[in-house]
Amino acid sequence: MGKNLKHIHMSDYRRLAPGQGGFDFLPVMQALKDIAYDGYVTMEIGFDSRSVQPDSIARLALEHLKGLEKQLK
């Protein structure tokens, strides 16, 4: 899709925060960088109980993806 790709919606296994479910996001992020993707990337994260802290999970997800971003070539 290259230049026609406008939005990416990703999810880790079992809808856990990135880095918690085992999916390797690095190759996906590298492929997006390789095509100079500059659109949105959203994450679908499920909550398995009412006691979860969405802000903490969002922060964990962002930190993991930012760490991967530093590894891109």
Image (cartoon, rainbow, N blue to C red):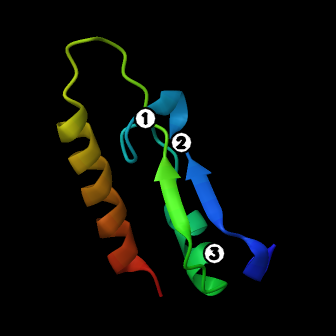
**The residue positioned farthest toward the right in the image shown:** 1
Q: Is residue 64 left or right of residue 31?
A: left
| Image: 70 above or below 44 | below
CA distance for labels 3 and 1:
22 Å
Q: Amino acid type of disc 1? A: Ile
Q: Which mark is residue 31?
A: 3
Inter-mark Cα distance, 1 to 2? 7 Å
Where disc 3 sits, the SS reads: helix
Q: Are marks 1 and 2 in contact (CB under 8 Å)?
A: yes
Amino acid type of the residue tagged 2 in the rendering: Ser
User: What amino acid does circle 3 point to?
Assistant: Ala
Relative to 30, does residue 24 appear above or below in the rendering? above
Q: Using the image, tell me which numbered label, if any, was put on residue 64.
A: none
Whether residue 66 sits left or right of residue 40 in the image: it is left
Say which quarter of the image contains residue 38: bottom right
**Image coords of residue 65 (percent x, y):** 36, 61
Q: Residue furthest top?
A: 50
Residue 45, disc: 1
